[in-house]
Image: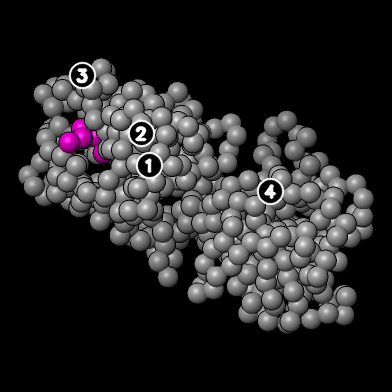
Amino acid sequence: MSEYKNDLLKKLENKSAKLGVVGLGYVGLPLAVEKAKAGYNVIGFDIQDSKVNMVNEGKNYIGDIVDTDLADLVKKGNLRATSDFSFVKDVDTVCIAVPTPLDLYKQPDLSYVISSTKSVAQYLKKGMLVILESTTYPGTTEEVIKPILEEKGFTCGVDIFLAFSPERVDPGNKHYNTKNTPKVVGGCTPACTELAGMLYRSVLEGDVMEVSSPAVAEMEKILENTFRNINIALVNEMALLCNRMGIDVWEVIDAAKTKPYGFMPFYPGPGLGGHCIPLDPFYLEWKAKEYDFHTKLIETSGIINDYMPEYVVECTMKLLNNEKKALNGAKVLLMGIAYKKDIDDMRESPALKVIDNLLKNGAEVLYNDPHVSSFKHNGNEYTSVNWEETIESADIVIITTDHSCYDYEKIVEKSPLLYDTRNATKHVVNNRNKINKL
């Protein structure tokens, strides 16, 4: 057994290991907090000084973290943040949790991962464990990360250790969080896997499943989100058909989910949002081409889901036409800008694509979101309006995010024309004749 592996195992067992987390966003900061709560000394690394300063002041900016937890950990000295990567030399493990977006051509952009890995590699030392958490295509850990770390003459699995463990953060989930969600780990060698598994078991309550390689763990994460992508595309296509047939797709889904086996409910909407589902299938699609394999079903699901924001605007146009109004010049109020209910996360929000399509057709767009006070998009600045003061002057109101705090009875009552893309008005009793649904 490697002496470096032995030393790190002992440090993990007695919690004397110092842990580093690169990227203090929706994935990295909750992970850093849980590690510090487990008794470790944790350093968070981020290139954004604003995040570093907020962490060091004990100020929380992530919805899934309890404010007092962060403040207490910082005050006790268990957690601190820095933009100076030279402090990597002081830690025993580093988790990389940085964005993996798509470029203009919907191809993987690994620039953040590569940049972070190079920063870590500058201060890499023998016995260090590096774990990539950023979602990416199968092969990234061994084909991209490993060569960078081994450039200085280190040998993976002997004097340094490398693994992949996909993040499974679901912002706003009331039941599952970083602490209790099961983990998957796959190391470049059995020693790498063992150490990564040991680290997560010492921090988390959820089970830790060890797989045979980083590629299996990378593919596992892609499968999770591709599964959801395809099923959402299926139900979106059903919604389009049901709309033509005059059938309520929401009622169809409610009926289907009474079956206790063989059916899992998914729901239609104005498009896909978030940090994983709209992006991950494209990572797999891109990698598959290297093997001369075309992911036909995945490509088709992407086409369907990408069409939904445009479909929402087409329906908006028809609803206005029925009132003898044009979309060009109409005042449109969007209720909700976050990609899902009860969070402030706007990444890949379908509401942004709805806005783009509305503006293209000459509409005036206003929005309300209790979780997002303002934002910038495509050069324009938007500020959340008071919906109760604005709603009656709008030509149409579109519910794009079904936040729980909205008074849907009042929204329906005061809307001159309402289009509900989330079935948020399901339990509204009065004025149901005013409701138009996706």
Indicate the secondary structure of the residue bearing disc 1: loop
Whether residue 353 appears in this view of the structure is: no
Q: Position of residue 174 (x, y in %)?
A: 60, 34
Residue at the disc numbered 4 = 403
Q: Magenta residues? A: 90-96
Label 1 – label 2 distance at C-alpha = 8 Å
Where is 138 relative to 212, above or below?
Answer: below
Label 4 – label 3 distance at C-alpha = 47 Å
User: Can you tell which of label 3 and label 2 is closer to the viewer?
Assistant: 2
Q: What's the residue type where badge 1 is placed?
A: Glu
Indicate the secondary structure of the residue bearing disc 4: loop
How many numbered callouts?
Answer: 4
Q: What's the residue type where badge 3 is placed?
A: Lys
Asked if marks 3 and 2 touch (Cβ < 8 Å), the reply is no
Residue 74, labelled with which disc? 2
Residue at left offset 77%, top offset 62%: 389
Q: Nearer the viewer, residue 191 or 28?
A: 28
Q: What's the residue type where badge 4 is placed?
A: His
Residue at the disc numbered 1 = 57
Label 3 – label 2 distance at C-alpha = 25 Å
Indicate the secondary structure of the residue bearing disc 2: helix
Label 4 – label 2 distance at C-alpha = 32 Å
Asked if marks 1 and 2 touch (Cβ < 8 Å), the reply is yes
User: Which label's residue is closer to the chain start, 1 or 3?
Assistant: 3
User: Can you tell which of label 4 and label 2 is closer to the viewer?
Assistant: 2
Residue at left offset 31%, top offset 49%: 46
Q: What's the residue type where badge 2 is placed?
A: Val
Residue at left offset 11%, top offset 50%: 151
